[in-house]
C-alpha cells in the first residue's frame, strides 16, 4: 500500500473491549484510587472544638452553595445522563468563543487547526452526529457555535444519550446552549480586550445589561469583534500512473493570507409573568459577520524527467453572514399538576460569498470565480403538555413542526456556468415520555418518538426528493445502591439516527480549485441517501463529592446501519463539465459500523483527596474510542474523524494573600489514520493545545485577565491518499499556527 508517511502504521487491533488496553488500565487505576480516597474522606468526622463560654445566639443552619454545586446537583438528580456547565465554569478560563469552552468537556473534540476553533464533535464522531440546540430548539441553518461568546450563554447542557423531548437526531449526543437569563439585582458585566497573534491584532467587547423594568425580567447581551488572523498552509502532492511511470508528478503549493473579520452578536431574553402560572418569554437573536481575506498561492511542479514548472495566483475572498431570529415560549399552568408550553421560532439567514483566483501564465492555477448566495427562511412551532400523575409519574407529550426554505444562486465552475437551487425541508415529530421514581433506589425515564423529514430541491439537475421517517424508543434508568449516598449507576438503551443534510442531498456541483485529481475532487449531492440508524447502550458509574466534585466512568456502544460517507469515482461527461472526465466525491450509504468508548471524568479540589495539598481546583477527563466500518477492509477502518482517545486536564488556584488567580489547561488528541474505502485513506495529525491565564482582582467589581492560548504551537498535519483506477495520489497538508495573547479588562458596573 502506498503510505502517506514513511513511518509504518501499526496493524489495527481487533475491536475488543476498550477496558482491556494498558492505557485504560492505567487511568482506571488512578480513578479507583481517587474513588477510594474520596470515600474514606467522606466518612471522616470533623474534629470537635470545645464550645466557648461566651453566649452565642443560634441562627440555625446556614448553607451557601456556589453555582458549581447547583450545576452538579442538577446533573446528579437527572434520570437521563446530563452534564451542566454554568456561569462559573463559562467565566473561569476567559475564553473568546464558546468552542474553546466545549473542547475541555468530557468526550468533546474540536475539528480544525489547534487554537482556531472548528466544528464540535462528541465521542469523536464526525459531522452531523452531535445535535446542537439553542434554547432547546434546533439551531438555524448556517449557524456556528464559534459565533457565540461565553458572555452570551447562561449554561450548557450536554446529554450523552437522546430523550424523546430533546430529539433522537443525536447518535453521539446533544449540546443544548441556553442563552443568558436576566437578574434584576445583578450589575452589568462589561469586558473589553485586545489579542495578538503572529503580528496581527484583534479586539473584542462584551456587554451584559440586566433590565430593571417593572413587571418584566430580562437581559440584553451584545458582543462586538474586529479580528485579524494570519494563515499559512502548504500542501505536498505526489501523483503516479501505474501504467506510465513517466507521468509521475511532484507538486508543492503554499498559500499565505490574512483574514479580517468584523461583526456583532446580540441576544436578549425578555420575560413577563402573569397570574395563575402564565409567562411569556421572547428571545430575539442577531448575528452579523463580514469577512475578507487577501492572499497568494505559489505552486511548483516537477515531472518524472526532472522538468520544473511553476505558477502563482492571487486570492481574494469576501463573505457576509446575517442571521436574525425570534424565539418565543408561552407557559400556562392548567392546574396544580398540568403545565402547557408552546414554543415558536422565526428566522432568516443570508450568506454572500465570493472567491476570486487570478491565475498565472502557465495554467497550473487557473483563473476562476466561485460565488454562493443563499437565503434561508426557517420557522418552527411546538407544543408540550407536562402532567404530574399519581405514584410519582411525570408524563410529557408533544408535537413539533419545522420548515426550512432555501434559495441559492451559485457560480461553481471554471467556465462560469451558473446554477440556481431552490430547496426545502419539512419536518414533523410527535413524542411522549414518562419519568417516574419506583422507590428510593430506582427511577426511570422511558419515551417513544416518531419523526418524519421530507427534503426536495430543484436545480439544473432537475427535481430531487428524499423522505425519511424513524421510530425511536428510548429508555433510561438511575439506580442508587444506598439511598442518600453519593454513589449511583446510570443505564440507557436508545435508538437514534442521523439524517442526510440538505447539502448531502441536493448540493450544486462544486469544482476543485486546482487541477482535478483524486485528492482535488469535484463534489455533488446524492438524493437517494437513507438516514443512518443507531442502537445505543450507555452505562455509567458516578460518585459525587462534597464541595461539588465528582468522579465518573461512562461506557457506551453504538451499532450504526446505513453509514453515510463520501466516496470518490471517475465520472464521464458530467453535466457541469461536458465532454470531460472528472474525479467526483459524492455521499453514499456504505454499510454498517460499530463504535464503543470509555469516558472518565474527575473534578475535585486537590485537598479533598490529599488534605495536605493546596486547594487547587482540578478538572480532568480522558476518553477512549474505537470503531469499525464493517464493509471497509482494515486496518484503521474506523469512523471518520474519530481519534483513539482524547485527554484534558486543567487546574485553577487563587493565591493566598494577594488577589491573583492562576490557571491553565492541556487538551490533547493523538494522530490517527482512517481507511475510508478500498481506495481512500485520510490522516489527522496530533493536536496539543495548552492554555494558561492569570486574573488579578483590583476589587470585587474590577479585574484584569491575561490569557495565552495555544502556548506551545506546533504545525498541524492532515493528509489524504487514493489508490485505484491505475492511479496513486497522496497529499499532505501542513498548517501553521501561533500563540494568541489576550489582555482583557473585566468590570461590573
Image: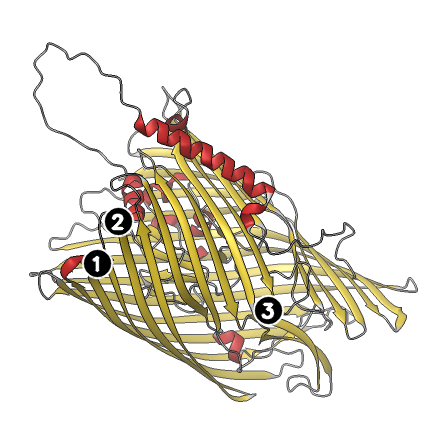
Q: Is residue 71 visible?
A: yes
Q: Residues within 10 Å of mark 1 (few under 14, many from 20)?
A: some
Q: Secondary structure at mark 2?
A: strand
Residue at mark 2: 209
Instruction: Name which quarter of the figure residue 619 lies in.
Output: top left
**On the picture, is 305 further left or further right than 93?**
right
Question: Taking the image as drawn, is residue 707 in sight?
Answer: no
Q: Can you give x and y, in whole percent of width and height, for residue 664 in the image?
A: 48, 35
> Who is closer to the viewer here, 89 or 346?
89
**For the residues carrying marks 1 and 2, which lies nearer the camera in this image?**
1
Secondary structure found at label 3 = strand
Marks 3 and 1, how far apart in space? 40 Å
Label 1 vs 2, first from the N-terminus: 2
At 62% from the left and 83% from the top, the residue drawn is: 417
Give the residue at mark 3: 355
Tell whether label 2 touches label 3 (CB within 8 Å). Answer: no
State the quadrant of the C terminus: top left
Q: Label 2 neighbourhood size at 10 Å, few (<14), some (14-19), many (20+)?
A: many
Label 3 neighbour load within 10 Å: few <14, some 14-19, many 20+: some
| Numbered tag placed on residue 270 in the rendering | 1
Amino acid at each position: 500500500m502506498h503510505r502517506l508517511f514513511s513511518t509504518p502504521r501499526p496493524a489495527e487491533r481487533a475491536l475488543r473491549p476498550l477496558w482491556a488496553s494498558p492505557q485504560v488500565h492505567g487511568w482506571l487505576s488512578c480513578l479507583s484510587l481517587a474513588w477510594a480516597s474520596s470515600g474514606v474522606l467522606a466518612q471522616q468526622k470533623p474534629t470537635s472544638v470545645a464550645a466557648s463560654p461566651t453566649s452565642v445566639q443560634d441562627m440555625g443552619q446556614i448553607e451557601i452553595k456556589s453555582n458549581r454545586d447547583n450545576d452538579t446537583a442538577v446533573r446528579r438528580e437527572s434520570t437521563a445522563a446530563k452534564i451542566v456547565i454554568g456561569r462559573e465554569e463559562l467565566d473561569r478560563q476567559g475564553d473568546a468563543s464558546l468552542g474553546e469552552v466545549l473542547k475541555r468537556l468530557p468526550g468533546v473534540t474540536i475539528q480544525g487547526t489547534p487554537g482556531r476553533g472548528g466544528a464540535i464533535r462528541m465521542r469523536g464522531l464526525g459531522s452531523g452526529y452531535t445535535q446542537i440546540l439553542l434554547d432547546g430548539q434546533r439551531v438555524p441553518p448556517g449557524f456556528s457555535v464559534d459565533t457565540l461568546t461565553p458572555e452570551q450563554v447562561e449554561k450548557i447542557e450536554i446529554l450523552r444519550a437522546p430523550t424523546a423531548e430533546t430529539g433522537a437526531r443525536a447518535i453521539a449526543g446533544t449540546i443544548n446552549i441556553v442563552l443568558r437569563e436576566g437578574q434584576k439585582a445583578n450589575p452589568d458585566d462589561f469586558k473589553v480586550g485586545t489579542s495578538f497573534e503572529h503580528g496581527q491584532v484583534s479586539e473584542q467587547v462584551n456587554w451584559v445589561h440586566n433590565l430593571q423594568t417593572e413587571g418584566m425580567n430580562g437581559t440584553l447581551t451584545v458582543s462586538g469583534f474586529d479580528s485579524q488572523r494570519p494563515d499559512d498552509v502548504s500542501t505536498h502532492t505526489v501523483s503516479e500512473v501505474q501504467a506510465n511511470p513517466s507521468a509521475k508528478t511532484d507538486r508543492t503549493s503554499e498559500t499565505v493570507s490574512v483574514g479580517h473579520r468584523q461583526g456583532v452578536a446580540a441576544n436578549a431574553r425578555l420575560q413577563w409573568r402573569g397570574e395563575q402560572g402564565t409567562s411569556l418569554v421572547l428571545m430575539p437573536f442577531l448575528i452579523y459577520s463580514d469577512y475578507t481575506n487577501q492572499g497568494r498561492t505559489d505552486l511548483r511542479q516537477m515531472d518524472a524527467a526532472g522538468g520544473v514548472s511553476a505558477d502563482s495566483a492571487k486570492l481574494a475572498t469576501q463573505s457576509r453572514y446575517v442571521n436574525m431570529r425570534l424565539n418565543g415560549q408561552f407557559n400556562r399552568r392548567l392546574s396544580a399538576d398540568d403545565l402547557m408550553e408552546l414554543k415558536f421560532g422565526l428566522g432568516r439567514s443570508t450568506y454572500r460569498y465570493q472567491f476570486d483566483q487570478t491565475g498565472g501564465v502557465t495554467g497550473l492555477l487557473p483563473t476562476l470565480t466561485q460565488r454562493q448566495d443563499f437565503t434561508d427562511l426557517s420557522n418552527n412551532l411546538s407544543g408540550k403538555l407536562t402532567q404530574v400523575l399519581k405514584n410519582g409519574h411525570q408524563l410529557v407529550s408533544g408535537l413539533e413542526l419545522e420548515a426550512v426554505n432555501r434559495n441559492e444562486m451559485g457560480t461553481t465552475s471554471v467556465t462560469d456556468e451558473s446554477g440556481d437551487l431552490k430547496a426545502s425541508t419539512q419536518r414533523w415529530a410527535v413524542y411522549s415520555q414518562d419519568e417516574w421514581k419506583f422507590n428510593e433506589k430506582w427511577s426511570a425515564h422511558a419515551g417513544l418518538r416518531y419523526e418524519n423529514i421530507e427534503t426536495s430541491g430543484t436545480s439544473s439537475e432537475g427535481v430531487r426528493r428524499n423522505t425519511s421517517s424513524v421510530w425511536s424508543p428510548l429508555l433510561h434508568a438511575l439506580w442508587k445502591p444506598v439511598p442518600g449516598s453519593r454513589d449511583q449507576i446510570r443505564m440507557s438503551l436508545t435508538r437514534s439516527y442521523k439524517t442526510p443534510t440538505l447539502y448531502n442531498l441536493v448540493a450544486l456541483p462544486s469544482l476543485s480549485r486546482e487541477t482535478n485529481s483524486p485528492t482535488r475532487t469535484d463534489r455533488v449531492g446524492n438524493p437517494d441517501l437513507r438516514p443512518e440508524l443507531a442502537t445505543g447502550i450507555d452505562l455509567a458509574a458516578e460518585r459525587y463529592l462534597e464541595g461539588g466534585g465528582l468522579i465518573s466512568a461512562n461506557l457506551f456502544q453504538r451499532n450504526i446501519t446505513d453509514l453515510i460517507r463520501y466516496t470518490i469515482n471517475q465520472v464521464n461527461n458530467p453535466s457541469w463539465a461536458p465532454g470531460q472526465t472528472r474525479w467526483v466525491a459524492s455521499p453514499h450509504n456504505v454499510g454498517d459500523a460499530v463504535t464503543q468508548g470509555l469516558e472518565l471524568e474527575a473534578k475535585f479540589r486537590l485537598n479533598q483527596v490529599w488534605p495536605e495539598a493546596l486547594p487547587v481546583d482540578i478538572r480532568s477527563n480522558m476518553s477512549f474510542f474505537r470503531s469499525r466500518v464493517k464493509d471497509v477492509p482494515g486496518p484503521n477502518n474506523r469512523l471518520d474523524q474519530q481519534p483513539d482517545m482524547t485527554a484534558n486536564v486543567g487546574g485553577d488556584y487563587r493565591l493566598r494573600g494577594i488577589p491573583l488567580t492562576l490557571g491553565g489547561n492541556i487538551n490533547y488528541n493523538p494522530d490517527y489514520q482512517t481507511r475510508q474505502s478500498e481506495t481512500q485513506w485520510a490522516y489527522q495529525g496530533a493536536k496539543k493545545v495548552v492554555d494558561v491565564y492569570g486574573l488579578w482582582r483590583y476589587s470585587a467589581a474590577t479585574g484584569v485577565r491575561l490569557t495565552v492560548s495555544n502556548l506551545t504551537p506546533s504545525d498541524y498535519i492532515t493528509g489524504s491518499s487514493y489508490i485505484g483506477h491505475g492511479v496513486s495520489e497522496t497529499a499532505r497538508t501542513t498548517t501553521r499556527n501561533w500563540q494568541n495573547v489576550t489582555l482583557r479588562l473585566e468590570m461590573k458596573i
